[in-house]
Image (cartoon, rainbow, N blue to C red):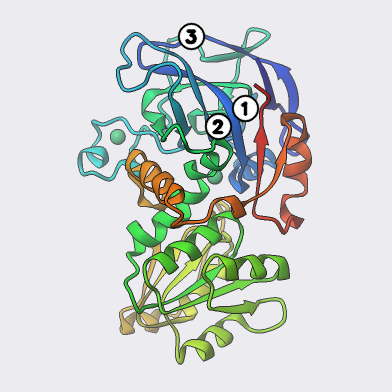
Amino acid sequence: MRAAVLTEFGAPLVAADVRLDDPAPDEVLVRVVASGVCHSDLNVAVGNLPASPRPQILGHEVAGVVERVGSGVTAFAPGDHVVTCPSGFCGTCSWCMSGLLHLCTDKNRARPAGQPPRATLDGVPVAQFAGLGGFAEEVLVHERAVAAIPAEMPLDRASVLGCAVVTGMGSVLNTAQVRPGQTVAVIGCGGVGLNVLQAARFSGAATIVAVDRAAAKLDRAKLFGATHLVDAGSVDAVEAVREITGGGVDHAFEVVGRPETIEQAFAMLRIRGAATVVGVAKPADRVSIGALDLLSEKTLRGAQMGSSRFRLDVDLFARMYLDGRILLDELISRHIALDDVNDALQSMDDFTGARSVITVDA
Ligand SMILES: [Zn+2]
Ligand SMILES: [Zn+2]
């Protein structure tokens, strides 16, 4: 099957004919219909995570149709529509047993050592990003990295559920637990940030301030629930948010992954406010906060995959979309072919749309 393979950091992905093994007893083979292009893919492609194995198939926002299942799989059958998620779960580690599946210590659900690789290129093992490898015509994955979706759910829109939607909406609903009447600021209004915005609206937040530098992103932020817009390229974002909210917000969400914006998120909090960092920073990044600010009971906390229990959350968000209660159509700015994935990655930092989604021909 065709796949876009990372062979060298900073170089274009290479279109290659990758061989997938037969499903092991606990695996499913999924025909990819749609695959979102996320900033985390770019992070690996450019070498920001130098320990990442190569060759590797990137991509982790897949929606597709189950083709075959391993002999031990009972939860899925061929023909089922599914979404893959980067936070699979083992079901037995202490985090899984505590109900915190997104913190599973074995979430990539790779094959045990000594077993043949799932994917090979000319006989050489090919790694799968997040245990998935979605820039491909097919993915062979552990059954616990897959969530069922209703058959009436359009698969291109379903693809973004697996990362952008569970991460963004989950950060608000599960991690921060925003309550009606609270004030919220969101720094960074890309695909994930838009989902933070719409979950804040869904939670009943009274004031929702969107902060970004791109006019097109701020425009879209309005559609997703922002009540106020701050152009961080022309004004001081912290001062602007403090002025709009009369002293600071209950919740600030950082959806960029940079030390400066994490510090801004903390600085724009009111007393007892909480800054939730959704963006993924580089390993060497450090942040600095005013230590005395902690006296006013402020919180700076991390978030991973929206603290989601993804089989429950993916199903919930799919049904909310089908009921017309959340936006997904507007998240997909362009449909591209698998061969165009390099263009999408290279232009990502300048792209003012929301998400690019690869649609693979049946
Ligand atoms: Zn992602
Ligand atoms: Zn686990």
Task: Check if mark 3's residue and mark 2's residue have beta carbons within 8 Å.
Answer: no
Can residue 103 be seen here? The reply is no
- Residue tagged by mark 1? 57
Label drawn at residue 116: 3
- Tell me the distance, in whole angstroms, between the alpha carbons under discs 2 and 1: 6 Å
Residue 150 pos. (x, y %): 41, 35
Placement of the C terminus among the 4 image quadrants = top right
Question: Which one is in front, 153 or 162?
Answer: 153
Q: Nearer the viewer, mark 1 or mark 3?
A: 1
Q: Which badge, 3 or 2, comes first in the chain's sequence? A: 3
Q: Give, as a three-letter code, the residue at label 3.
A: Pro
Q: How far apart are the two marked residues, 3 and 2, measured between alpha carbons?
A: 17 Å
Would residue 231 be found to the left or right of residue 22 on screen?
right
Query: Contact (CB < 8 A) between labels 2 and 1?
Result: yes
Rate crowding at label 1 as few (under 14), some (14 to 19) or many (20 or more) other CA atoms within 10 Å. Answer: many
Q: Where does label 2 land, which residue?
A: 129
Q: SS at mark 3?
A: loop
Nearest the viewer among 63 and 184 is 63
